Amino acid sequence: MKLLRSGRRTSKVPLSGITPVDLADEASAGLFARPGRMVLTVSGTVIGIAALVATLGLARTTGNRILGRFDELAATEIIITTKAAGDGSTQEWLPWDAPARMERLNGVVAAGDLTYVDTNGALISTSPISDPSHQTEFDLPVQAASPDLFRAVRAKLSTGRFFDRGNSLRADRVAVLGSGAALRLGITTVNQMPALRIGDDLFLIVGILDSVGRFPDLMGAIIIPEGTARADYQIASPETVVVETQIGAASLVAKQAPLALRPDNIAALKVASPPEPKRVRDAVANDLNALFLLLGGVSLVVGAIGIANVTLVSVIERTSEIGLRRAIGATRFHIALQFLLESTAMGLLGGIIGASLGSVVVVGVSALRGWTPVLDPLTPLLAPVGGAVIGLLSGTYPAWRATRMEPVAALRTQG
């Protein structure tokens, strides 16, 4: 080492005379010597980092949407049924005013009865004439429902209306069809007041379901008023009470339901409440994060391979330059550091651009879908650091390869 004195200060400079500023200049020159190739190389890291940021952001965003849907449906649903009596020979009963009793409880949004109707094998048809050339009679399930059930299961109509409390009190022979049942019966609208027959009983079709949030079996059923089923088919009591609660009230309502419906025998009822929401939400979130992290990791590996490949090609192309610099005093450390700076700079640049692009993707997709974008603030901040680390690791082997070149051999290669 030689010593340079400036006043009272003494600094040590390597024999080669290469300073950190010189290394930065050399690395910049190496990067921008072929700008087209550098842009293509950086684009690989940009895509990898953007994919990682976007997938993490979209995972959080869609995860919140899924968990919100879980809260809206599964975490707000209570199903109440009866148990067999103690001797096993008879079935316990539910009161006919069960929906009204449940709706008096704090936290209940809607409640309705649902009962399977035994039609003694009667077939469903829309024509009084039997045509042997094609099927006109179908074996479809018939369900009796209280008017409030449609709200409790979040039913939506494609046409017509729901039957009301008056229809049930008068035992009117009206029916609402699930979309699957309507398709089998060949009914698409109620404008012409279509009717169907359950055995010999004629029912006016007043509505067709488009969708239900709960009890998807209703989409393939014939739904008639509870009062009509009591009068025509002698059902003894409701089989099921479907309750929708406010978010967070399900567990409390589930405890209160037996007292509200059967205070004389609370053990007669079976109450199915949703599982612990937090545990299910955490499981869903973990699965989504694992999936999207895997996809982002694959993208990053592709970007890292691109940087390593281009850096290695650069080492091979600049063999004579490396030999010349070694010959005039550059150390192996300086050579390695230059190529590491180049690869790290490409990774850092790709990380900055990729983080910005990924954040824009998250916001854009959320805006198009009407979602609320959710992105961890550390993700776009740490992404450039991750890009720089990937660039550093990708340049390790090419830099080591450059340090193994001997000056004479490198110069002879050029010759």
Image (tube, rainbow, N blue to C red):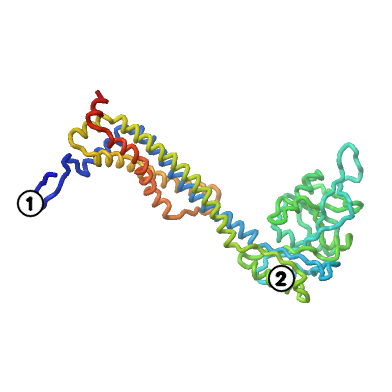
Rate crowding at label 2 as few (under 14), some (14 to 19) or many (20 or more) other CA atoms within 10 Å.
many
Mark nearer the N terminus (2 vs 1): 1
The spot of residue 9 in percent (x, y) is: 11, 52
Q: Residue at x 33, y 37 (%)?
A: 398
Which quadrant, please, contains the C terminus? top left
Q: Amino acid at mark 2?
A: Ala
- Alpha carbons under labels 2 and 1: distance apart: 91 Å
Q: Residue at x 21, y 31 (%)?
A: 324
**For residue 213, which quarter of the picture?**
bottom right
Give whichever of 7, 404 is nearer the camera. 404
Q: Which residue is mark 2?
A: 257
Q: Is residue 133 visible?
A: yes
Q: Residue at x 53, y 48 (%)?
A: 291
Disc 2 vs disc 1: which is toward the camera? 1
Rate crowding at label 1 as few (under 14), some (14 to 19) or many (20 or more) other CA atoms within 10 Å.
few
Q: Which residue is mark 1?
A: 7
Give whichever of 393, 224 is nearer the camera. 393
Q: Amino acid at mark 1?
A: Gly
Q: Is residue 376 left or right of residue 97?
A: left
**For residue 26, which quarter of the picture?**
top left
Which quadrant, please, contains the N terminus? top left
- Which label belongs to residue 76? none
Relative to 132, residue 191 above or below? below
The spot of residue 216 in percent (x, y) is: 72, 53
Give whichever of 341, 410 is nearer the camera. 410
Instruction: Please tell me whether mark 2 sits on a helix, a strand or a loop.
Output: helix
Q: Is residue 349 visible?
A: no
Asked whether the residues under the numbered discs 2 and 1 touch, taking CB atoms below 8 Å apart as contact, a structural biologist would say no
The spot of residue 212 in percent (x, y) is: 70, 54
